[in-house]
Image: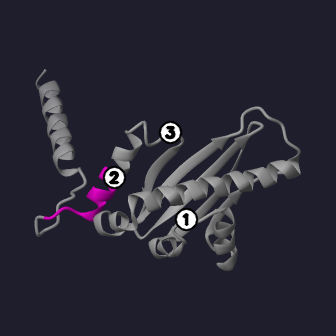
C-alpha cells in the first residue's frame, strides 16, 4: 500500500511538471508575445469559424501560412486527359480564391501582425474516387505584386513567367 502511494505521488509530480513546464512558451524575455502566438491564434480562429472555412483549412509551416482547399466534382466521370486538364483548372481556381482571400484580409495583417513570410496554397481536386493535388508557394512580396484584380489568365502568366517555381508539388495519376 505504501509503494502504491509513492508511485501515485511520483506520477502526480511527473504529470504536474510536464503540464507546467512542458508547454510551449509564447512569452519573450522582454514580456512581449512571440510571433508564433499571433499566427497560431489567427489559424485557430479561422479554422473554428464555420462561415470562413467551408472548404478551406489553415495551418502553419514555419513562417508560411498554409491554406488547404478542396474541390469535389462528385461522381461525374471524365476521360483521363480531360480530368488532368480539369484538375489543373480547379487547382488554379482554388489558388485564385485563396489569393483573393489574402487580398481581402490585407497584406499588412499578414506581415505586420502575424509575421508570415508567405503562403503555401495546397489545392486538392477530388474526382472519380481519386485526389489530384497541386501546391503553390508565394512570398508576401510576390502576392503584393499581383494586380489588384488578378484573373485566371494573369495568374497563369505570373506562374509561367516565374518558370513554374511557384508550383512546389504535384500529385496526379493518369
Left or right for 17, reference 173: left
Q: On screen, 6 above or below 146? A: above
- Give the distance between the C-alpha atoms of the residues marked 2 and 3, in whole angstroms: 16 Å
Position of residue 28 measured from the top left corner of the image (x, y, whole percent): 17, 66
Q: Secondary structure under badge 1?
A: loop
N-term mark: 3 or 1 = 3
Point out the image quarter for the N terminus: top left
Q: Of the numbered discs in the image, which one, if any, rests on residue 42?
A: 2
Q: Secondary structure under badge 2?
A: helix
- Do tag 3 and tag 1 residues touch (Cβ < 8 Å)? no
Q: Of the numbered discs in the image, which one, if any, rests on residue 64?
A: none
Q: Give residue 128's quadrant in the image.
A: top right
Q: Give residue 169's quadrant in the image.
A: bottom right
Q: Of the numbered discs in the image, which one, if any, rests on residue 54?
A: 3
Residue 65 visible in rendering: no
Residue 37 visible in rendering: yes
Position of residue 35 measured from the top left corner of the image (x, y, whole percent): 27, 64
Decide which of 17, 94 is in the foreground and name it.
Answer: 94
Q: Of all residues shown, which one is farthest toward the top?
A: 1
Residue occupying the point 60% across, 45% down = 70
The colour mode here is one colour
Q: Which residues are magenta?
A: 32-41
Q: Tell whether position 112 is magenta.
A: no
Disc 1: which residue: 149
Amino acid at each position: 500500500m505504501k509503494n502504491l502511494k509513492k508511485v501515485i505521488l511520483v506520477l502526480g509530480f511527473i504529470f504536474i511538471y510536464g503540464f507546467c513546464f512542458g508547454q510551449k512558451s509564447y512569452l519573450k524575455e522582454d514580456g512581449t508575445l512571440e510571433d508564433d502566438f499571433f499566427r497560431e491564434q489567427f489559424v485557430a480562429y479561422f479554422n473554428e469559424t464555420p462561415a470562413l472555412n467551408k472548404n478551406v483549412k489553415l495551418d502553419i509551416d514555419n513562417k508560411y501560412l498554409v491554406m488547404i482547399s478542396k474541390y469535389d466534382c462528385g461522381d461525374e466521370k471524365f476521360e483521363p486527359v480531360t480530368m488532368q486538364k480539369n484538375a489543373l483548372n480547379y487547382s488554379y481556381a482554388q489558388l485564385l480564391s485563396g489569393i483573393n482571400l489574402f487580398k481581402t484580409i490585407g497584406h499588412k495583417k499578414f506581415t505586420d501582425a502575424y509575421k508570415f513570410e508567405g503562403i503555401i496554397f495546397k489545392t486538392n481536386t477530388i474526382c472519380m474516387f481519386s485526389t489530384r493535388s497541386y501546391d503553390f508557394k508565394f512570398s508576401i512580396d510576390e502576392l503584393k505584386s499581383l494586380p489588384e484584380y488578378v484573373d485566371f489568365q494573369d495568374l497563369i502568366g505570373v506562374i509561367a513567367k516565374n518558370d513554374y517555381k511557384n508550383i512546389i508539388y504535384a500529385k496526379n495519376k493518369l
